[in-house]
Image (cartoon, grey):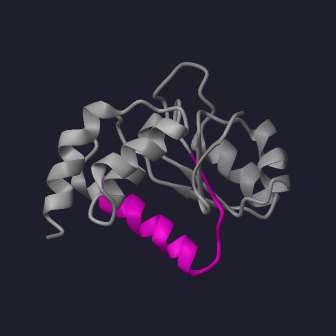
Amino acid sequence: MDSKQLTPQLYVAGQITKEDIPTIAAQGFKVILNNRPDGEGEGQPPAAEIEAAAKAHGLQYIYQPVVGTAISDENVEEFGATIAACANSNNGPIFAHCRTGTRCTILWMLSQAKKQSADELLATAAKAGYSLEQVRERLELLGKQSI
């Protein structure tokens, strides 16, 4: 399990297992945000299994499944609202995961497009190891909506 920091309050990672939960808790995370739908891949642990382990370690668990190839504006708004609510209630840092971390990163970038430029968001993603230039056009469109 290798998490990547996007902000002081948000880290992203690929698929986790219940065996990863003690390490996540020991690293100081307070919230696990799962953006991967159940049954997406072979061998993927069910969300309920991860949730039970998270709760057993005192972590808040949020299940917001998003299909990576069909990220809707509603998905973006829900993700943005969730990370904002966690930050406002000091329930962070947040450990968000999906299959590879890419989907969580895209959701974060899109949720921040009205606050930061596409260049800034893409640079942050790249620093974390995600090359997501294919999202630039959508970021720029969302950024124009803030004007």
Quadrant in the rendering for residue 142: bottom left
Looking at the picture, does residue 134 appear above or below residue 117? above
Residue 30 visible in rendering: yes
Vertical comparison of 8 with 45: above or below: below
Residue drawn at x 61%, y 21% is 43
Residue 15 locus on image (x, y percent): 60, 33
**Relative image position of residue 76 (x, y in whole percent):** 32, 55
Q: Residue at image x 39%, y 63%?
A: 80
Residue 35 rendering spot, x and y as whole percentages: 47, 45
**Along the horizontal axis of the image, is 110 left or right of 59?**
left
- Viewed as shown, does residue 87 lie left or right of 35? right
Q: Residue furthest bottom?
A: 89
Main SS of residues in magenta: helix
Quadrant including the N terminus? top right
- The residue shown at (41%, 59%) is 79
> In this view of the protein, which residue sits in the foreground, 118 or 16?
118
Q: Is residue 99 above or below residue 106?
A: above
* Relative horizontal placement of residue 134, taking residue 10 as reference (left or right): left
Highlighted range, magenta: 76-96
The question of residue 93 being in magenta is answered with yes
Residue 48 location in percent, x, y? 62, 47
Give the quarter of the figure containing the C terminus. bottom left
Is 112 situated left or right of 143 in this image?
A: right
Q: Residue at x 32, y 47 (%)?
A: 119
Is residue 69 in view from this perspective? no
